[in-house]
Image (cartoon, rainbow, N blue to C red):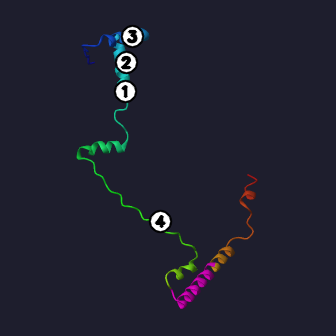
Amino acid sequence: MASITVRNLEEELKRRLRVQVAENGRSMEEEVRVILRTALYCQPLAPQDLAAAIGARFAPLGRVKLDIPPRSPMRQPPRSASWSAWPNRVGMDENGRQQHKREIDDLEKVFAAMRHARTISQPRNTQPLRSSIAHL
């Protein structure tokens, strides 16, 4: 083990160390070892803040001030979420609107047929899950 010698201690510091040694029932050397362990092992070695660590790393290079551009005001939300309202916003003529309406109607028929097919393919006499596992 290594040993150290501490010279030129203030009298008040030495007196307080003697009082602490007497209170704790240790030798002067043991009390100094406990104080050093407590002081060195109980404190964090370095701050764990990432921003502070990055700032300290680049501090010698000088600070850079970036101008943040002004933001424009937010746009108004759309008034209608309906797909049929979409052609009116892009300036479609009457024939285009009618064609678009027919396409939407055709798609709605296809989706209705798909929903119908899905309900037919499922078993009709299924019991709810709770009643089927009630006997467990």
Give the distance between the C-alpha atoms of the residues marked 3 and 4, in whole angstroms. 70 Å
x and y percent of residue 78 in the render?
A: 54, 72
Point 36% across, 12% down: residue: 17
- Of the numbered discs 2 and 3, the one sitting upstream in the chain is 3
Of badges 3 and 4, the one in the foreground is 4
98 in relation to 45, above or below = below
Circle 2 crowding by C-alpha within 10 Å: few under 14, some 14–19, many from 20: few
- Secondary structure state at the residue bearing disc 4: loop
x and y percent of residue 112 in the render?
A: 64, 79
Q: Which residue is mark 3?
A: 21
Whether label 4 touches label 1, CB < 8 Å: no
Q: Which mark is residue 74?
A: 4
- Of the numbered discs 1 and 2, the one sitting upstream in the chain is 2
The stretch drawn in magenta includes residue 75: no
Q: Which mark is residue 41?
A: 1
Q: Which residue is mark 2?
A: 34
**Which residue sits furthest bottom?**
95
- Secondary structure state at the residue bearing disc 3: helix
